[in-house]
């Protein structure tokens, strides 16, 4: 059946792994080893990063085995930024670095969405860690009462890329109702357009946990937009959206005479 894909015309080309664009990041919020094995069997071709969400990695049974499993499947694992913040607020930065090395983690997320500290301090952590790890950093607060202007988003993102982040993550939480989205899950169009114009959509990993958000980004930015906070059981569904094989993006890649 997989060969049938070759028969279809006007299917977007997806870059092979390892890729810089068209990235998919999945959030693992505590999958068991068996669930992780099933997910890896289906998703290894389509998933680039697996985030062990928030602080789940320190309480999930068999997490070291799961990290190895994901790495063997060709998916890069990193720990949720909230765990980084939990170590930082306790003054345990050195212990956090030790944890990363002991776990075989090569990518690290730097965030300040729960614990607010000076942005200059965040930039310093990015500089320090980028010497030993691949760093991605998250911009935006997890708190609804903290709202940044588009110019502030752009300023922070530029500074973090300059400090050593390979990608900046646009905050949305796993609910998809904060940061770059409105309370009802709809996109904050002005903010997203400003970020895309000033930062470049290829430099941003857009958190998009909801189907309508994924479809919006694919329709507006193309099949190879970077998307994150995807549920493990939604990988094939997302790839179908990317290829125009689902109703939400069915006409996105067809020529005018077929629409």
Image: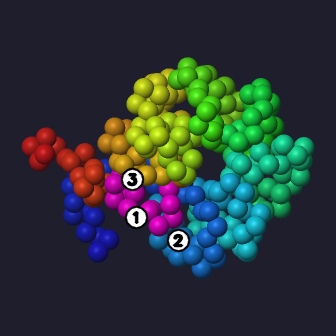
Could you tell me residue 97's position as x and y percent? Answer: 84, 50
Q: Earlier in the sequence, mark 3 or mark 1?
A: 3
Real-space Cα distance between discs 2 and 3? 19 Å
The numbered dot on residue 211 is: 3
The numbered dot on residue 236 is: 1
Q: Quadrant of residue 169?
A: top right
Real-space Cα distance between discs 2 and 1? 10 Å
Picture residue at 21% right of the left edge, 64% below the top: 7
Range of magenta residues: 230-242
Q: Can the viewer see residue 135 in this picture?
A: no
Could you tell me residue 98's position as x and y percent? Answer: 87, 55
Residue, disc 2: 39
Viewer-side residue, 87 vs 104: 87
- SS for dot 1: helix
Indicate whether residue 231 is drawn in magenta: yes
Q: Earlier in the sequence, mark 2 or mark 1?
A: 2
* Dot 2 alpha-carbon crowd within 10 angstroms: few under 14, some 14 to 19, many 20 or more: some
* Foreground label between 3 and 1: 3
């Amino acid at each position: 059946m997989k060969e049938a894909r070759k028969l279809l015309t006007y299917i977007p080309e997806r870059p092979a792994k390892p890729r810089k664009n068209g990235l998919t990041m999945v959030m693992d919020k505590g999958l068991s080893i068996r669930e992780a094995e099933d997910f890896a069997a289906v998703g290894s071709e389509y998933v680039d990063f697996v985030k062990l969400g928030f602080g789940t990695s320190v309480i999930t049974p068999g997490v070291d085995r799961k990290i190895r499993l994901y790495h063997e499947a060709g998916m890069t694992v990193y720990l949720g930024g909230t765990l980084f913040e939990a170590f930082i607020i306790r003054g345990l930065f050195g212990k956090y670095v030790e944890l990363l090395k002991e776990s075989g983690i090569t990518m690290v997320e730097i965030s300040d969405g729960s614990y607010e500290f000076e942005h200059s301090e965040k930039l310093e952590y990015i500089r320090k860690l980028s010497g030993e790890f691949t760093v991605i950093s998250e911009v935006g607060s997890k708190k609804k009462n903290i709202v940044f202007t588009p110019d502030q988003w752009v300023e922070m993102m530029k500074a973090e890329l300059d400090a050593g982040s390979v990608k900046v993550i646009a905050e949305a939480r796993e609910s998809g109702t904060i940061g770059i989205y409105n309370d009802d899950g709809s996109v904050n169009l002005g903010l997203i357009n400003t970020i895309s114009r000033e930062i470049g959509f290829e430099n941003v990993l857009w958190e998009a946990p909801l189907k309508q958000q994924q479809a919006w980004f694919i329709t507006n930015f193309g099949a190879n937009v970077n998307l994150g906070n995807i549920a493990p059981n939604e990988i094939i569904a997302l790839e179908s959206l990317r290829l125009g094989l689902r109703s939400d993006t069915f006409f996105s890649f067809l020529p005018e005479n077929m629409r």
